[in-house]
Amino acid sequence: MAGVSVDEAIQSLSVTIGATVPTGFEHTAAEEVQEKIGAIARISKDRGRIYFEISTVHLHKVHHLKSVDNLFVVVKHYDNYQFKETKEEALLDLQQLAPVLPWDPALEVWKINNSLKKKRGRRRGAGPPKLKTCDASEPVQPQADVAELKEKPEGTCAEQEPNPEGEHDSDIQETEAKPLKFRVTCNRAGDKHSFTSNDAARDFGGAVQEFFQWKADMTRFDVEVLLNIHNNEVVIGIALTEESLHRRNITHFGPTTLRSTLAYGMLRLCKPQMSDIIVDPMCGSGAIPLEGVIEWSNSFFLSGDNNDMAISRTVNNINHILKKKQDGGSISPGLSIDTAQWDLCNLPLKTSSVDIITTDMPFGKRMGSRKRNWDLYPSCLREMARVCRPDTGRAVLLTQDKKCFTKALSRMGGLWRKTHTVWVNVGGLHAGVFVLRRMAALFGSTPEDVREPRMGCVSQDDNIEENVQSSRSE
């Protein structure tokens, strides 16, 4: 490569990046990748993953994606890997695979990614070197126990933060001078494998250790090698994120705090426009309006709940974001967001004054109850229709109580029309994100406007004890 230095060649590597995303929002994440990076994302056969090609010159951009939970660089992808029938032969194949994989480009990306993290630390005004506190009660797991692609344990120690100047080169030299610590995380799906995730992680990890002479460490590792197996699709990768990006904006969590990545996906379904008024009437911890106000700063967000603890959490999370902006040197006057305590079924908002409503409704499991939902959901939809602008208003509502919601929606034919549904996994629960369009009829002119006797409205934080009693009786 005439006229190009080795460093320049490394910095312009073309690599495949993999990302885990909330299941059901793969297409939404692919749209964001196309919009912000200009790359065409491929949706994996295994739900919850996308892949896209990128030059390492633009590697920093992937950390600004809002739809992704975890990022990794792909070492090798096998679309139709043929596993041997017996457990011993299949595991032996995995062991023999480790030393012949093209590790070098992925490891170079891992090093570049580490340097980007150090630069971000310097921009944030990192102080003297310090180590994150480890939880001494966190047990060190054997390698065979690492069976799923997941966040790092709470006790995982991060590498040292650099001083503002001068340590970067010495840090890299020190890391390269001693053996790296690593772990293998296996995520396996399919019923035709003769081995378990633990078996694959253990045997493949042993081969990686023998090849690189790295030291296995399940909690304080430098490198996390990923082995993703979905039927006959096999993807080997190296993690680029230390913890899931879905925790990025929330510091005060509630019992059912929504993942930031899922909140962002719901907002993208709304397609917010400049100057839109967007309301989350059951804000919980404020995950949805916080994601919105950061990404769509030219819209105005209103968040509310009838539970004072939820309001307190939301206000604290807003203040946290404001402090981050100030610490980062922002001269912006604040955020276009406000919070109020209210009754969802009697919102203190003018009729036809809201463009978008998006919220996480009570599932009737950890919060609220299925019995109360039969009264709550029709009242919610009716009040949302009142405040939403006819013809242009829209709503994106998340619930696992699909039967109750569908029945309530069927009674609102003159007010709401469902455009489509995105099926998602929320903490192991199969839930639906319902995208609704406000009909053109003015509120007060349809039979659906007549209010029926109802029980008091609830928030995400109400009726925990009632729900527990209901579950016991069931």
Image (spheres, rainbow, N blue to C red):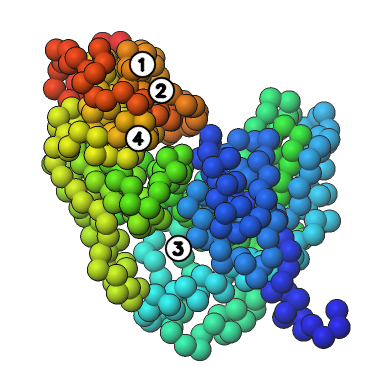
In terms of depth relative to the viewer, which is nearer, 228 or 310? 310
User: Which residue corresponds to mark 3?
Assistant: 157
| CB under 8 Å between discs 1 and 2 | yes
Q: In the image, what residue occupies the spot 70% across and 56% down?
A: 53
Q: Secondary structure at mark 4?
A: loop
What amino acid is found at the position of numbered circle 1 in the picture?
Answer: Gly
Residue pointed to by mark 2: 417
Disc 3 residue type? Cys
Pick the front one: 340 or 324: 340
Question: Which callout, 1 or 4, points at the residue further toward the start of the chain?
Answer: 4
Which amino acid, mark 4? Answer: Gly
Query: Does 113 sit above or below residue 37?
Result: below
Instruction: Give percent across and percent down for residue 418.
Output: 43, 24
**Tag in front: 3 or 1:** 1
Gap in Å between the C-alphas at discs 4 and 2? 11 Å
Q: CA distance from mark 1 to mark 2?
A: 7 Å
Residue 72 image point, x, y percent: 62, 55
Q: Residues within 10 Å of mark 2 (few under 14, many from 20)?
A: some
Mark 1 burial class by Cα count in 10 Å: few <14, some 14-19, many 20+: some
Circle 1 residue? 413
